[in-house]
Image (spheres, rainbow, N blue to C red):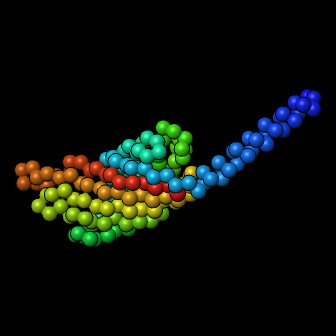
Amino acid sequence: MNALHRRIAVAVLVASLLVLVPATAGAATQTARFSISGTEVSATSTTGRFVGTASGSTLGTWYASVVHVPLSGGVGAQVAIQSGGSFGMALAQAEPAYVVSGQFSRGTITTISSGTNCKNQVYEVDGDLRNVSVTGTGHFAAKLTHHRRSVLGRCWLYAATVSGTVTLG
């Protein structure tokens, strides 16, 4: 390699570093916010599993497994979200990343409407995320609605939907 080629190679390398290093450093502190909607696909007394769509700086899908103390009590009652549940997103573009993963660290589920007389039950889910792959931390805030109907004198839960926001960073 002659001297001219070495100088060109060094200039390209330096220019690349000048462009990439600030972008990479800034990406770690960037905040991304997504609107989410979806459905509860399975539930036990202590775990709810959700899937849905996300929109924001890009479109995507998301899932969450929320581990919690059993729901109980009337309007205003709160139960704790326990550490260990998971969260993930698959995004259509690489901003902030194609795949995002993390875990719930803590939070609360608050009863907004207890569903007396077989009306819908509504809960506010407010959870902190840790170990988020692209930002370190995040936040999950959503309204969970248990849709119910009375059939032949019995109250049946037939669907559960969720909508809210996820903030990464």
Residue at 56% from the left image edge and 54% from the top image edge: 30
Looking at the image, residue 66 sits to the left or right of residue 169; the answer is left
Count of numbered tags:
0
Relative to the observer, which residue lies in front, 58 or 42? 58
157, 10: nearer the viewer: 10
- Name the residue located 22 percent from the left edge and 59 percent from the top edge: 121
Residue 83 visible, this angle: no
Which one is nearer the viewer's eye here, 154 or 26? 26
Measuring 45% from the left and 52% from the top, which residue is drawn there? 33
Q: Residue at x 45, y 59 (%)?
A: 139
Q: Whole-percent x and y of residue 105? A: 48, 63
Residue 134's place in the image compared with 72, above or below, is above
Q: Quadrant of the N terminus?
A: top right
Answer yes or no: is residue 153 visible.
yes
Q: Is residue 80 above or below residue 86?
A: below
Q: Taking 37 as reference, is 151 left or right?
A: left
Left/right placement of residue 81 relative to residue 31 reads: left
In the rendered view, tell whether residue 56 sits above or below residue 130.
above
**How far across and down, in percent of the image, does residue 152 sit?**
6, 50
Question: 126 and 18: which one is in front?
Answer: 18
**Residue 82 in which image quadrant:** bottom left
Hey, which residue is sitting farthest right in the picture?
A: 2
x and y percent of residue 120 in the render? 19, 56
Residue closest to the far top: 1
Q: Position of residue 60 (x, y in %)?
A: 44, 41
